[in-house]
Amino acid sequence: MNLKHNTAFGFTFSTPCLLFALVLLLLSIIPSAKIISSPIPVMASVEGNQESDDNDNEENTRDEDDEDDGNSGDDIDLDEMNLLQICCAWSDKISDGVLEYKISDGGDEDSKQSVRNAIQDWDLLIDNLIFVEKQDDSEADVTIGFSDSDEDANDEEFDYGDSIAAGKTEFRFDNTGFIDSIEVTLSGGIFGNGFQNSELEQIARHEIGHVLGLGHANFDGSLMSESTDGGTENISICEINGVLAANYWRLVAVGNNPEYPEANFAVC
């Protein structure tokens, strides 16, 4: 069985990629999709991209695996494009250029260090934003925890039908549709077998990609590929550009007022 990235966003043990269904759904709403000319290669601009749910601060549910049985009618051949989904943007909580995170006491020290290593990898590549670990009990922007045992990946919380999640990322949005806080849960292993530190780092690196506003990639060979089998442990230029596009208002414009991403996808 394979590990696939799944969410509210995460990493699992392999099912068909859900991103194309989402792409087709979005394109059915968009009168015309086009490549947008900007320093960051992005695609498929949608107005009102980040409207909040009916209830303020309500947690996102995981994506539904809906099959699309129609054709969008657009002249864009999605099969020929490598796309990275841009999920959402952070609120003014990162207007100071700091994203605070806290690691729960659930994991052992090696597991915690694997998470720190994954965060540091992103930290070194993203300008105008630094990650700061909180050591006290106060609330953090991002809380990272571990399942209770290496068999918890088989529990209902991590079961996504044909696939089993190695990690999940749950968003909480403010009343304007910007990310207010995030909870990441990493599984200890699968079928009684714990993950190696390098595997846990890859899973954590993927989940931090979600934390920074990325969805899934629709192609293999990306850190944000939905399945670990199709993924890689390295952060690519495309994923960096996706993060910059997701939080352009702060990471590029270095502004103080949050703005929604101008596109739903980066073209890789």
Image (cartoon, rainbow, N blue to C red):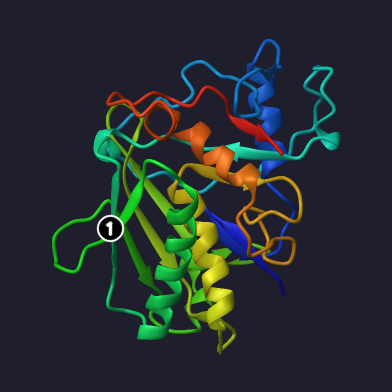
Examine the image and state in which quarter residue 185 appears.
bottom left
64 vs 247, left or right, is: right
- The amino acid pointed to by label 1 is Val
- Residue positioned 43% across, 61% down in the render: 119
The quadrant the N terminus occupies is bottom right
Visible residue check, residue 105 = yes
Examine the image and state in which quarter residue 84 appears.
top right
Residue 23: x and y in percent read 68, 32
User: Can you say whether 60 is above or below 177 in the image?
Assistant: below
The residue wearing badge 1 is 132
179 vs 137, left or right, is: right
- Residue positioned 18% across, 56% down in the render: 139
The quadrant the C terminus occupies is top right
Residue 224: x and y in percent read 62, 53
Residue extending farthest to the top is 31
Examine the image and state in which quarter residue 253 appears.
top left
236 vs 116, left or right, is: right
Foreground residue, 1 or 128? 128
